[in-house]
């Protein structure tokens, strides 16, 4: 193996050094020596501040733990809040905060729509995600439970025309709701054509036009026989695709073969909780994928359905319109999610010590982003010259300030205008929620979103108040006071700080990727709550969730909410979700532990053994759930909390670990590369899962990454030793 490269006080992993030298720097107009000298300066200057802030997290947690120890039983809310203020957990709320973020792309500032998240290490998924700006409504309906399977509508193997007709009917109803015709239904359409720049739809009783002619944005193909009709509603586009030679189009009286929906308006390429990146090699691959996304070159060979093809990033989409040529972006506007402030990385050492992984993300992914700002590929992502970074897991305004200063330092190194780097503030730690206005104030000229990451936020809720008592059951958490206060106040604070027009106010992940009927029913709640975007786990979910932004005019809803003023108080946010253990039966306790343990094992075994950071794992009811590090944080903190408070004993938990490991082994039995955890129960994965629970109280903020990283690194070393 090549030696590490020493530059000044830095010792750089050779693979990283080579990647920067031969792939990331060329074309960036950044000088190599200046880059590493700047990196050294940044790491040396900001490193100690980060260390202090991490120490503050520990100090606050210890103080809170002690307070609960000294104040057992029901919490005196006033005394508790006074205490949180005294220790600096709650900071004074700034009076008037108005964000001033400039050069924001319209996808963020003006167009409410789905936000897709994808593990950046998976190039097949990542290219797919970037391309998920546009998605087939027919496929999304046909291929999921969005359309039920009753009355002959089964999916089956071959195309089922009965199901197909149900899909077409759904889509026509949808078109009627978003772009009604004057005096007819899209179901009556016999032909679509463009006449004098207007959409004319032939029906049995004659031609009709759109009720609102301005909804025709453009068309593809000849006006008299268009291949695509582009409609716009609530800022989102839908394209009626016409091809009478297509098998679906041939069966349609107007030749409609599909309705393409503008779906993932924005997308987050995730370097954080959905990937397993534990060493320099993993990090370089993640940074490379991001660089290639910025260069527009990321591609992947895909084999499916018996054929192999190369998946590349889609080009823009060209249309004609009444006013001339029209181009629509073919890809989602991309954010990159860095890791938070906690973890170190050995990819670079400063004076022989590992440095902040998050600082490296800012430097190296930041360098990748330069390719969207300068040179031949500029503008492929942002048309306004901005870089969009999601910064997760920040605790309070000082940590936001650190991120802001980090970005300023990176801009200087890369020779970029101040405030080029925008920040998405994940409101997913309790100290950030409770001080959200001050957090926004710290980043007022960079904020591109605030987002309720309710999964991490739930994990932090449990860890922060670990000593307060046993937490309510997982399913009951959704109905607790703190969570509704959190969701409401995030929107209220965002609106009060003037995010509208500058930044997104986002909501969290739909974590049941196969339950699309349920999502269609429930996730409309997010735009109704004033969210300009909300997270979806897949392109299909993005297409279906897009329909919600047609049903709800989010910008109008935000005006209504802003006029109403704040709906909640900080006290409600700070209520602690402890439950009544006496009310839970033996079976309740066992079920709760089994459910959590199954989720932990099902997730962790793939993380540690195969390096898969986001998985679909069945819960004990058989519902497939998206599991990532945040959901794992919840499950492990929950069991740790119940163990700590004697709601369950170690014997029950240990028994659950073994029974659930057998179950998870069975679930994975179809995978020839899978290494079972039973009967030895001594592999790195099984031990990692146990550590997460048994050492759950000592984990910083209840995070899973220290244990997962350690065990994955050990597993990699073990596998390398064997080969
Ligand atoms: C709390 C938080 O931090 S949430 C944020 C982190 N979570 C995420 O990023 C969720 C990302 N989603 C995923 O990784 C996946 O959807 C999972 C793991 C949930 C389910 O994955 P799978 O079981 O493989 O999905 P499934 O088999 O249903 O579908 C796979 C197909 O969908 C595509 N797909 C699924 N998810 C995504 C995605 N997020 N982006 C792009 N494409 C996707 C795949 O490309 C694949 O299609 P292909 O064969 O044409 O390439
Ligand atoms: O990152 C998202 C979350 O819910 O946590
Ligand atoms: Mg999170």
Image (cartoon, rainbow, N blue to C red):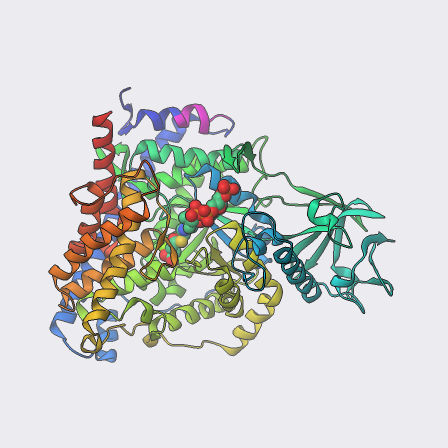
The overriding secondary structure of the stretch rendered in magenta is helix
From the top left corner, tell me how far across and down residue 441 is, in percent. Answer: 42, 61
Residue at horizontal 26%, vertical 74%?
81
Screen quadrant of the N terminus: top left
From the top left corner, tell me how far across and down residue 205 is, in percent. Answer: 87, 65
Q: Left or right of 125: which side holds 708?
A: left
Quadrant of res 500: bottom right
Does residue 246 appear in the picture of this structure?
yes
Q: Which residues are magenta?
A: 19-26
Residue at the far top in the pictured view: 2
Q: Left or right of 146: which side holds 217?
A: right
The count of marks equals 0
* Residue 288 is one of the magenta-drawn residues: no
Residue at horizontal 21%, vertical 61%?
639
From the top left corner, tell me how far across and down residue 137 is, in percent. Answer: 61, 54
Residue at horizontal 34%, vertical 34%?
282
Report ligand 2 position as a quadrant. bottom left
Residue at horizontal 63%, vertical 38%?
315
């Amino acid at each position: 193996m090549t030696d590490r490269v020493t530059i000044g006080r830095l010792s750089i992993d050779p693979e990283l050094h080579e990647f920067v030298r031969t792939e990331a720097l060329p074309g960036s107009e950044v000088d190599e020596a200046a880059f590493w000298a700047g990196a050294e300066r940044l790491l040396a200057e900001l490193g100690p501040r980060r260390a202090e802030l991490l120490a503050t997290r520990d100090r606050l947690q210890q103080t809170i733990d002690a307070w609960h120890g000294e104040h057992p039983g029901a919490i005196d809310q006033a005394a508790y809040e006074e205490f949180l203020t005294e220790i600096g957990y709650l900071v004074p709320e700034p009076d008037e905060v108005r964000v001033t973020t400039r050069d924001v792309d319209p996808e963020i500032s003006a167009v409410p729509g789905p936000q897709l998240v994808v593990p950046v290490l998976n190039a097949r998924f990542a290219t797919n995600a970037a391309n998920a700006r546009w998605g087939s409504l027919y496929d999304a309906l046909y291929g999921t439970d969005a359309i039920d399977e009753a009355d002959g509508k089964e999916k089956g193997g071959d195309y089922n025309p009965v199901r197909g007709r149900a899909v077409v009917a759904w889509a026509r109803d949808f078109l009627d709701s978003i772009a009604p015709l004057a005096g007819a239904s899209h179901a009556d359409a016999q032909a679509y054509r463009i006449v004098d720049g207007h959409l004319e739809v032939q029906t049995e009783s004659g031609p009709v036009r759109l009720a609102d002619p301005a909804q025709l944005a453009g068309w593809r193909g000849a006006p008299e026989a268009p291949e695509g009709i582009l409609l716009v509603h609530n800022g989102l586009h839908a394209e009626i695709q016409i091809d009478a030679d297509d098998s679906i189009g041939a069966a349609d009286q107007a030749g409609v073969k599909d309705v393409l929906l503008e779906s993932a308006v924005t997308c987050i390429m995730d370097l954080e909780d959905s990937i397993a990146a534990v060493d320099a090699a993993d990090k370089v691959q993640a940074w490379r994928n991001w660089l290639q996304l910025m260069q527009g070159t990321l591609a992947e060979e895909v084999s499916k359905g018996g054929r192999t093809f190369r998946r590349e990033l889609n080009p823009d989409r060209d249309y004609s319109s009444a006013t001339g040529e029209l181009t629509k972006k073919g890809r989602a506007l991309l954010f990159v999610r860095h890791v938070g402030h906690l973890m170190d990385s050995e990819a670079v050492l400063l004076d022989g010590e590992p440095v902040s992984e998050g600082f490296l993300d800012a430097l190296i992914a930041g360098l990748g982003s330069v390719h969207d700002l300068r040179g031949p590929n500029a503008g492929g992502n942002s048309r306004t010259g901005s870089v969009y970074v999601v910064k997760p897991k920040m605790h309070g305004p000082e940590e936001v300030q650190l991120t802001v200063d980090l970005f300023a330092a990176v801009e200087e190194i890369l020779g970029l205008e101040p405030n080029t780097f925008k920040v998405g503030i994940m409101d997913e730690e309790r100290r950030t929620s409770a001080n959200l206005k001050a957090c926004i104030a710290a980043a007022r000229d960079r904020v591109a979103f605030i987002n309720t990451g309710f999964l991490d936020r739930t994990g932090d809720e449990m860890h922060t108040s670990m000593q307060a008592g046993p937490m309510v059951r997982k399913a009951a958490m959704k109905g607790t006071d703190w969570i509704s206060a959190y969701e409401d106040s995030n929107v209220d604070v965002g609106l009060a700080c003037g995010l509208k027009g500058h930044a997104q106010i986002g909501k969290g992940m739909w974590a049941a990727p196969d339950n699309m009927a349920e999502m269609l029913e429930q996730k409309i709640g997010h735009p109704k709550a004033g969210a300009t975007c909300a997270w979806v786990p897949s392109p299909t979910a993005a297409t279906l969730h897009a329909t919600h932004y047609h049903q709800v005019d989010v910008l109008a809803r935000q005006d209504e909410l802003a006029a109403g003023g704040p709906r909640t108080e900080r006290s409600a946010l700070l209520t602690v979700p402890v439950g009544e253990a006496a009310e839970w039966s033996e079976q309740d306790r066992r079920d709760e532990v089994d459910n959590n343990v199954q989720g932990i094992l099902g997730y962790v075994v793939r993380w540690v053994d195969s390096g898969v950071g986001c998985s679909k794992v069945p819960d004990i009811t058989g519902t497939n759930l998206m599991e990532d590090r945040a959901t794992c944080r919840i499950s492990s903190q929950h069991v740790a909390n119940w163990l700590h408070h004697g709601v369950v004993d170690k014997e029950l938990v240990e028994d659950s670990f073994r029974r659930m490991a057998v179950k998870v082994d069975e679930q994975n039995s179809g995978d020839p590369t899978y290494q079972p955890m039973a009967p030895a129960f001594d592999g790195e994965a099984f031990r990692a899962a146990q550590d997460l629970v048994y050492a759950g109280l000592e984990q910083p903020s209840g995070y899973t990454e220290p244990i997962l990283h350690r065990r994955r690194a050990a597993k990699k070393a073990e596998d390398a030793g064997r080969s």
